[in-house]
Amino acid sequence: MKKQPYKVQLEKGKNYAWCKCSESINQPFCDGSHNDINRKNKNVIKNLIDINLISDIESANRLLAIDYKEPVVFAAKEDIEVSLCGCKESDSAPYCNGTHLNN
Ligand code: FES
């Protein structure tokens, strides 16, 4: 994962999906990799339920603190160059807010 922002040119009216899971090979944009991560998490939970270690999906999500990663979808309101977050810790995602400077 890159610990710095990506400077990208956005096109007015175009939709973008910013990668939140860090696994996309098309950073900072989503390539669908989050689906594999979410599928693996669901398989782990299913196995835990199957062997009666956990009773249901909601309990598993809470106990394991599973955070299902979905991309942040947004539309560009103008043609503009922006800094999209590369560290995945910005509270202003998809935009860099300087949090990477603290890491
Ligand atoms: S890259 Fe700057 S806050 Fe994430």
Image (spheres, rainbow, N blue to C red):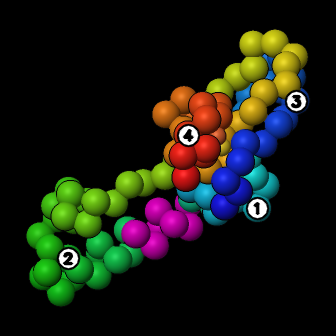
Q: Distance between the residues labelled 3 and 4?
A: 21 Å
Q: Distance between the residues labelled 2 and 4?
A: 38 Å
As helix, strand or loop, the secondary structure at mark 3 comes to strand
Among numbered discs 3 and 4, the one appearing first in the sequence: 3
As helix, strand or loop, the secondary structure at mark 1 comes to loop
**Amino acid beneath label 3:** Gln
Among numbered discs 2 and 4, the one appearing first in the sequence: 2
Residue 54 location, x and y as percent? Answer: 14, 74
Residue 21 location, x and y as percent? Answer: 56, 56
Q: Quadrant of residue 76?
A: top right
**Amino acid beneath label 2:** Ile
Q: Can residue 87 be seen in this view?
A: yes
- Pointer 2: what residue? 49
Q: Does the residue at mark 3 contact the one at mark 4 (Cβ under 8 Å)? A: no
Q: Which residue is depicted at the point 56% across and 67% down?
A: 36
Residue 90 location, x and y as percent? Answer: 54, 38
Among numbered discs 1 and 2, the one appearing first in the sequence: 1
Residue 41 location, x and y as percent? Answer: 40, 69
Q: Which residue is depicted at the point 56% across and 40% down?
A: 99
- Pointer 4: what residue? 99
Q: Does the residue at mark 3 contact the one at mark 2 (Cβ under 8 Å)? A: no
Among numbered discs 3 and 2, the one appearing first in the sequence: 3
Q: Does the residue at mark 2 contact the one at mark 4 (Cβ under 8 Å)? A: no
- Pointer 3: what residue? 9
Q: Distance between the residues labelled 1 and 2?
A: 32 Å
| Image depth: mark 3 or mark 4 in front | 4
Q: How far apart are marks 4 and 1 (CA)?
A: 22 Å
Q: Is residue 56 left or right of residue 21?
A: left
* Magenta span of residues: 35-41
| Residue 25 numbered tag | 1
**Amino acid beneath label 1:** Ile
